[in-house]
Amino acid sequence: MMRRMSRYDPSAFPPFAVTVDLVVLTVRDHALCALMVRRGEPPFQGFWALPGGFVRPDEGLVEAAARELAEETGLRAHGAPGQGPGVGAHLEQLATYGAPQRDPRLRVVSVAYLALAPDLPTPRPGGDVRSARWAPVEELLGGKDDDGMLLAFDHSAILSDGVERARSKIEYSALATAFCPEEFTVGELRRVYESVWGVQLDPRNFHRKVTGTPGFLLPAGGTTTRQGGRPAQLFRAGGATVLNPPMLRPES
């Protein structure tokens, strides 16, 4: 016997809002860093938090994430609707967070996005943000900032999930090149892996692996001395999206 569907009762469902939160990662001074903003308004006034905001009635989720990314960093999300030319960033959906008490104002469901980009300049605060900074993720993954203050909302968990996504994904995909400029050396790419994984890698073995993986890197036809020493060959990201064999993460 089929069960009858109950009629929809709007009074049984209190109002709720949808937000986007951004885990924006870059490599600065050989460290994996996340973009953090200090909130200027309640709730959690004065706390550090991930950038983000409410989804507007006339936009979709990815449009909201791309808008927040542009407002906070000046970056354009690759492939996002309505995003014109400009400095680009890799943007992908991370996870959805909807614990009933995660926001004291009302029921808020947040869709988190992961954004990766090469070394980025010092951010400029705006809107209800008092200040903004790049912070090494190792200082944040314990759930507190450098003042010993807990991060706002459930942003410690969201940040942890975003960092682990980046760490695991560069094992089997070419995502590590999203942290590099358009043309880069094998040494610069190695430092990305070292910064994201938090380990030291053997330069010769790394060079052999990345140059021997089909479709991972393409010669750019030039050299550079920006690292000092002898000229190093420049490469571009190849067309491979999946690395075969993968770049397995060493145990820390």
Image (cartoon, grey):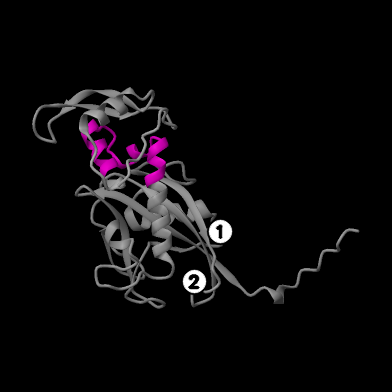
Q: Is residue 67 above or below residue 90?
A: below
* Residue sitting nearer the eye, 218 or 32: 32
Q: Residue at x 52, y 58 (%)?
A: 96
- Give coordinates of residue 109: x percent, y percent: 54, 65
Q: For the magenta stretch, what is the residue range?
A: 167-194
Q: Is residue 244 left or right of residue 132?
A: right
- Give coordinates of residue 116: x percent, y percent: 36, 47
Q: Which residue is mark 1?
A: 58
- Give coordinates of residue 156: x percent, y percent: 39, 64
Q: Secondary structure at mark 1?
A: loop
Going from N to C along the chain, the mark reached first, 1 or 2, is 1
Q: Amino acid at mark 2?
A: Arg
Q: Is residue 78 left or right of residue 110?
A: left
Q: Residue at x 81, y 68 (%)?
A: 6
- Give coordinates of residue 48: x percent, y percent: 33, 68
Q: Marks 1 and 2, how far apart in space?
A: 25 Å
Question: For residue 218, which quarter of the picture?
Answer: top left
Residue 193 covered by magenta stretch: yes
Callout 1: few (<14), some (14-19), or many (20+) C-alpha neighbours within 10 Å?
few
Quadrant (top left/top right/bottom left/bottom right) for the N terminus: bottom right
Q: Which residue is mark 2?
A: 102
Q: Nearer the viewer, mark 1 or mark 2?
A: 2
The secondary structure that dominates the magenta segment is helix
